[in-house]
Image (cartoon, rainbow, N blue to C red):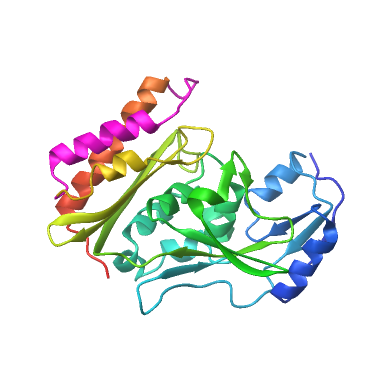
């Protein structure tokens, strides 16, 4: 099937792009990687009157750590940029663990982390990773910028709080309160498939105990799930087996899966708990360290 007719614009500045969105009155879509939008347009699940291609806007293709430890990922940073980074794992082990298993190599070449979060697919990988890290999205519109926690940014399946005249320009991870460690695991039927279950875990160690923890779940509910009670079970512990078991059980309880052709709800909850335990064991074995 072919997409509906649409107007194509390729602005060279953010100001131009925002002006185009404002004039379109909600009938425009941003094109960054296009790995979610274009297939939806071909199937006519999406039929925007205008595409605003931001690939010609310079300065949005970065990922970097600031001096204070804040990590920033620009709107045009590709999955592959993160996957191939030689330094990402030193700063963001949970992001580094997810990058090589997002979709497939073709999608990773063009798709973007920020675009994936804006797509808000309940089976998408990056939103759960950013939720576990207490990450935020920086949105820019006619009235300036605002910073929106990812936990609040996603408003439901394929829905965000982004205004029609705003562009998500950056994802931000705050500085760690200690030594950062973590991981991401997902169950998929075949390489490149959407996650049947995905679990992101991030912890920050201060001495021998956990100062902060986050657990995000993918594919087991109508939207990305912040398993905050499960993460809280890890705080103040030394990531011992009892604490990990408690967090695993609470994460499984936070999941809201449905039984389908990929497995029963009970099976998916079991996978959530198993992944929390596996990531906990990986952290203990590897002793991941980052600034």
Indicate the quadrant containing the N terminus: top left, top right, bottom left or bottom right.
top right
71 shown above or below 182: below
Q: Is residue 197 magenta-colored?
A: no
Q: Is residue 250 left or right of residue 238?
A: right
- What residue sits 34% from the left and 55% below the top? 94
Side of 25 relative to 219 (left or right): right
Quarter of the figure with the C terminus: bottom left
Outermost residue on the front side: it is 143
Would you say 37 lies left or right of 209 here?
right
Q: Please tell me which residue is depicted at 27% across the width and 31% down the height of the picture.
A: 249
x and y, in percent, of residue 70 in the image? 40, 70
Determine if residue 112 is in view.
no
Count of numbered marks? 0
Query: Percent position (x, y) of residue 271?
Result: 33, 31
Residue at 16% of width from left, 51% of height from top?
A: 284
Please provide percent x and percent y for residue 225: 45, 40
Name the residue nearer the viewer: 168 or 125: 168
Q: Is residue 127 above or below residue 290?
A: above
User: Residue drawn at (44%, 58%), measured in percent from left and top?
Assistant: 135
Identify whether 144 is placed above or below 182. Answer: below
Horizontal and vertical percent position of residue 226: 42, 43
Residue 101 shows up from this direction: yes
Q: Residue furthest bottom?
A: 67
- Magenta segment: 238-263
The image quarter in which residue 255 lies: top left
Q: Nearer the viewer, residue 287 or 237?
A: 237
Asked where in the image residue 146 lies, by quadrant, the reply is bottom right
């Amino acid at each position: 099937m072919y997409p509906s007719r649409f107007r194509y614009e390729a602005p060279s500045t953010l100001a131009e792009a925002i002006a185009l969105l404002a004039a379109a009155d909600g009938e425009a879509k941003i094109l960054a990687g296009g790995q979610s939008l274009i297939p939806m347009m071909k199937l006519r699940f999406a039929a925007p009157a205008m595409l605003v291609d931001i690939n010609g806007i310079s300065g949005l293709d970065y990922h970097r750590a600031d001096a204070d430890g804040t990590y920033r990922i620009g709107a045009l940073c590709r999955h592959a940029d993160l996957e191939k980074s030689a330094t990402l794992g030193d700063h963001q082990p949970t992001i580094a663990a997810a990058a090589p298993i997002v979709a497939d190599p073709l999608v990773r070449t063009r798709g973007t982390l920020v675009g994936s979060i804006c797509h808000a697919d309940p089976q998408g990988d990056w939103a759960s990773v950013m939720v576990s890290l207490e990450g935020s999205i920086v949105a820019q519109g006619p009235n300036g910028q605002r910073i929106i926690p990812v936990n609040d940014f996603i408003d439901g399946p394929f829905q965000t709080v982004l205004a029609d005249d705003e562009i998500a320009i950056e994802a931000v991870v705050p500085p760690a309160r200690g030594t950062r460690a973590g991981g991401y695991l997902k169950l998929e039927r075949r390489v490149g498939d959407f996650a049947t279950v995905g679990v992101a875990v991030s912890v920050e160690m201060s001495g021998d105990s956990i100062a902060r923890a986050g657990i995000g779940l993918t594919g087991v509910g109508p939207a990305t799930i912040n398993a905050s009670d499960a993460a809280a079970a890890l705080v103040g512990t030394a990531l011992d087996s009892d604490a990990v078991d408690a967090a695993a059980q609470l994460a499984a309880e936070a999941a809201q899966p449905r039984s389908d052709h990929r497995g029963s709800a009970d099976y998916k909850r079991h996978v959530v708990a198993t992944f929390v335990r596996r990531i906990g064991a990986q952290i203990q074995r590897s002793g991941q360290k980052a600034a």
